[in-house]
Image (cartoon, helix red, strand yellow):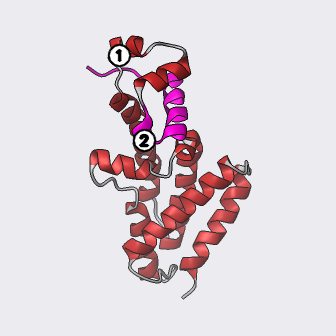
Amino acid sequence: MTVAVDETLRTAAIAVLAEYGWAGVTLERVAEKVGRSRVTLWRQGLTVEALLSSLLDALADDYRDTMWPVLAGSGTGREGLIRTLEALFDVIDRHLPLMLSSDLVFHQEQARNGPVSFLDPFERFLREGETDGTLHPHGRVSDVAEVLMVSAAFTYVHMRGRHHWSRSRTRRLTLDLVLRGVLEA
């Protein structure tokens, strides 16, 4: 039986996650945040796993759907990488409370569903850019892709969520910063 997790419960789960971490999310804590009893949530068929899966499913589905047009596009490796970073920022903006709650969000999704291709677009466009001469990854492409994605994602999350910078300011400065490492030979 699939249980519907409404936005109120998702918001409560994110608040508990931010306060207690992944292992600290309990039905009791979530119920307390929404002013219900744990038993009421349990009787509705809700579990901690269903709550957390709902959050991670929404993120993974959004990431996949947002990256699809980027991957189907054309252009140089550099252009593809820029579109990938901008798409990543779009996803982060839509899931900012979840991203602020833990730096383990992407790892949790991978632990749950095996290798998730969060890095695939970065690796693809770094390889294409290396081939077409528009990018110069200094090291193994898989390593550079991981550092690039993490640097961009968590710089963006921090500046948007903790410093309350505007989308445009955060995007411009984060793009400039992370691209410098792969533009020059």
User: Magenta span: helix, strand or loop, mainly?
Assistant: helix
Name the amino acid, label 1: Trp
Q: Position of residue 86 (x, y in %)?
A: 57, 56
Please name the residue that numbered disc 2 is placed on. Answer: 22
Label total for image: 2
Is 12 colored magenta in this rendering? yes
State the image quarter where residue 2 is shown: top left
- Relative to the observer, which residue lies in front, 8 or 121? 8
Cβ–Cβ below 8 Å for labels 1 and 2?
A: no
What's the magenta region?
1-25
Position of 160 compared to 28: left or right?
A: right
Quadrant showing the N terminus: top left
The answer to whether one can see residue 27 in this image is: yes
Seen at 54% across and 40% down, the residue is: 18
Q: Position of residue 175 (x, y in %)?
A: 63, 65
State the image quarter where residue 145 is shown: bottom left
Q: Rate crowding at label 2 as few (under 14), some (14 to 19) or many (20 or more) other CA atoms within 10 Å.
A: some
Position of 111 compared to 102: left or right?
A: left
Q: How far apart in space, not on screen, are marks 1 and 2 (Cα)?
A: 19 Å
- Relative to the observer, which residue lies in front, 64 or 18? 18
Q: Residue furthest bottom?
A: 185
Q: Please, what secondary structure does the residue beneath circle 1 have?
A: helix
Q: Rate crowding at label 1 as few (under 14), some (14 to 19) or many (20 or more) other CA atoms within 10 Å.
A: some
From this view, report whether residue 19 is shown above or below residue 116.
Answer: above
Seen at 38% across and 12% down, the residue is: 39
The answer to whether one can see residue 80 in this image is: no
Seen at 73% across and 57% down, the residue is: 169
Please name the residue that numbered disc 1 is placed on. Answer: 42
